[in-house]
Image (cartoon, helix red, strand yellow):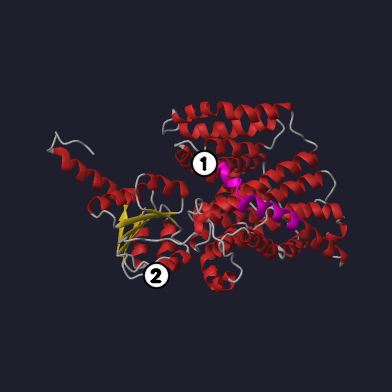
Amino acid sequence: MELIFFATAFVCGFIVLQIKLPPLIGFLAAGFLLNLAGYHSTPLLETIAALGVTLLLFSIGLKLKVDHLTKLQVWAPASLHIILSSALFCGFLLLLGFFGLPLFTDLSAESALLLGFALSFSSTVFAVKVLEERGEMASLHGKIAIGILVMQDVFAVLFLAVSTGKVPNYWAIALVISLFFIRPVFFWILGRSKHGEVLPLFGFFFALVVGYNAFEFAGLKGDLGALIIGMLLASHRKAGELAKSLLSFKDLLLVGFFLSIGLNAQLTVQALVVALLIISILPIKVALYYVFTNMFHLRARTSLLGAFTLANFSEFGLIVCALAASSGWLTPEWLAVVAISVAITFIIASPLNNRANDIYVKLENWLFKFESKVRLAEEMPVNLNRTKILIFGMGRIGTGAYEAIAHTYPDMVGGVDINPECIERHLKRGRFAILADATDPDFWQRINHSEVEMVMLAMPKHVQNLLALEQIKLSGYGGQVTAIANYPDQQKELELLGVDSTYNFYLEAGTGFAEHVKEHLFEPDKATP
């Protein structure tokens, strides 16, 4: 049965990919098509989906620092949003009941507030998938969005504890305290897991056993446990490598999650109509995210892109409705309504995020009127000094290019990256590095690039380089542009868009190694750099 599910997901995902939409829309569509064909979710598929979500949260934790959650621009908007949106959505549902609409007439004030609370949450799974596909996990708006989602997870834990009567047992205190004492042991094990198959097994063990099951045993939410264990390991030098080793497993397992949404929905015309009415409040939810983050001195673009990332309903709404239906607080039809609503908002939010920069450019003059005059340190204007060559993406390839150019042309090369930790490392080594987002239209308006003769796009995601290239053209830059690519078809796409030269680092890595060997082959006494 599961083979049929995943085969259908592949076909739908492949078709959607050809029209340049995220494959997850195809996976959701596959779930609904299978449902219409008479199929239903299976225990194995539900297990696969749960594993995918747990690994996803563990991976988020590996990239998240605790200090991000303590920032005012994270916890304050998250708290304000969940309180106000729950109240507004509750009022909206009761108003529809007042007009005698089906299903809404059965809602009491308590059940409407419960639904409003469920609809106030945004999907962690969707947000992370979108940010990863666009290479924006380390961007400021990406970190703000993830921080808000983690805060929502905290609210979720409190709700589940109160509503189910399941309170943490005496093991919970011992577990939380012990984690900080045995953290060095975790580091020691991770450091000695090397680079092979033991590394992803380490991830599975710590996400599922040390994280999920240990927290469940202590009466806490297992998914939150996986997230916290990931956060404890985030400062280890191999955290990034561990996250990459889990990437394929996580993505494959999450296909099961997207399939399960469609397969679990009991599709009826009434449920579809009610779901469409529920979706009509989505713009209010997005607007609240924008207003609250903008209140705490985030730029208009950062607030808008963060709000778009959170522009959906959450799978947590399904958990709340399932719990409420089993307890008799809601009729079972509401579970189908929320499942359909979640799926449709995923489909709406995907192209919305793909066009986020274009939408911002069209709205920026109007949005500037409401932008705070106070700027965060991460969003201050930048000075390029005497830079002639600007490298975007200061990972291994960008850093290598920087060092090679700086050796010949010191003080004429600069690096740009969206990751604050990356920029801090380069600054400590005496390199000229700027914290900025190459895909940000404002960045190109806030710098004077008239003296820059070459831009090198060395960002790891192909889509990042394409988006940056678009902004470079719009900024009126007239110098040379060169870019890296993973595959020949990506090189061709970049060249058709006007890039002067491309570098396929997979294809040319062997050539570079051969040149290195030839250089040293007849110089045995020459030290290897």
The amino acid at mark 2 is: Lys
Is 524 rendered above or below residue 83? above
Residue at the image position 58 percent from the left and 35 percent from the top: 229
Residue 365 point in image, percent of width and height: 55, 73
* Quadrant housing the C terminus: top left
Camera-nearest residue between 277 and 467: 467
- Per the rendering, the mark at residue 384 is none
For the residues bearing labels 2 and 1, Cβ distance under 8 angstroms: no
Give the answer, above or below, for where 452 lies relative to 140. Answer: below
| Residue 85 is inside the magenta segment | yes
In the foreground, 54 or 284: 284
* Magenta stretch prevailing secondary structure: helix
Q: Is residue 144 left or right of residue 380?
A: right
Q: Which residues are magenta?
A: 63-86
Which residue in the structure is indicated by mark 2? 473
Res. 370 in view: yes
Q: Residue at x 48, y 66 (%)?
A: 442
> Where does the image place residue 422, in percent across and percent down from the top left?
43, 47
Q: Residue furthest front?
A: 374
Q: Within the image, what quadrant is residue 276 found in?
A: bottom right
Residue 170 located left or right of residue 45: right
Q: Residue at x 57, y 59 (%)?
A: 298
Where residue 440 sits in the image (x, y, percent)? 47, 63
Q: Check disc 1 and report the residue beneath it.
A: 249
| Sequence-earlier tag: 2 or 1 | 1
Kindly indicate the quadrant of the structure image that contains residue 503: bottom left
- Residue 39 image point, x, y percent: 67, 49
